[in-house]
Image (cartoon, helix red, strand yellow):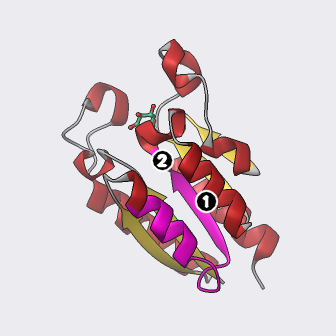
Amino acid sequence: MKILVLNGPNLNLLGIREPGIYGNNSYSDLCALIREKAARLGVEVCLYQSNHEGDLVDRIQQALGQEDAIVINPAAYTHTSIAILDALKAVGLPAAEVHISDVTRREPFRQISYAGMACEAHYIGLGFEGYLKALEYLAGKYGA
Ligand code: DQA
């Protein structure tokens, strides 16, 4: 099984950006944790981060025929991007939404998740652990 793990804007600055909200660990620390978990689950992962909405849409489209499932933290595009929602719906792959922080307890503008509408599982406010739980869920449900 192949899982695409997508991260949106500013998540490349994990460890630097607002550590009180997102913690002290870096994006490469996150990637290492994800790779370790994937190896234990016996799944392949492709990690992709972009600060650009269209790049994320392109990568979701490329997943068609290439990956079996998607873990996505669209970051700020969560709350604005119908294009990312449409791309997830278009490819129709099982998807899980992750947010490091608990967006349900933050500003009103973070209360809508467009991408989340195309996701069957949601891991919100669990820090990096949310990505690992999302992998476990998808591997458990769709893995060989
Ligand atoms: C985030 C929450 C978003 O509201 C924010 O714009 C982010 C990160 C999270 O992981 O908690 O960039 O998706």
Q: Quadrant of ligand 1?
A: top left
Disc assigned to residue 97 = none
Q: Residues within 10 Å of mark 1 (few under 14, many from 20)?
A: some
Q: Which residues are drawn in magenta? A: 55-74
Towards the viewer: 13 or 25: 13
Where in the figure is residue 52, as x and y percent of width and height? 33, 53
For the residues labelled 2 and 1, say whether their Cβ atoms are less than 8 Å apart: no
The answer to whether any part of residue 20 appears in the image is yes
Q: Is residue 10 left or right of residue 44?
A: left
Question: Compared to 139, does 57 lie above or below?
Answer: above
As for residue 96 lying within the magenta part, the answer is no
Q: Is residue 137 left or right of residue 103?
A: right
The residue drawn where x is 28% and y is 47% is 25
Instruction: Calculate the distance from the C-alpha at mark 2 to the C-alpha at mark 1.
Output: 12 Å
Residue where numbered disc 1 is placed = 87
Tally of numbered tags: 2
As for residue 63 lying within the magenta part, the answer is yes
The residue drawn where x is 71% and y is 50% is 118
The residue drawn where x is 55% and y is 17% is 105
Where in the figure is residue 34, as x and y percent of width and height? 46, 66
Q: Is mark 2 within 8 Å of ligand 1?
A: yes
Which amino acid does the dot numbered 1 rest on?
Ala
Towards the viewer: 116 or 141: 116
Where in the figure is residue 11, as x and y percent of width and height? 32, 48
Where's the C terminus, which quadrant?
A: bottom right
Q: Residues within 10 Å of mark 2 (few under 14, many from 20)?
A: many
Question: Compared to 58, does 79 lie above or below?
Answer: above
The answer to whether any part of residue 93 appears in the image is no
Residue where numbered disc 2 is placed = 74
Disc 2, SS:
loop
Where's the N terminus, which quadrant?
A: bottom right
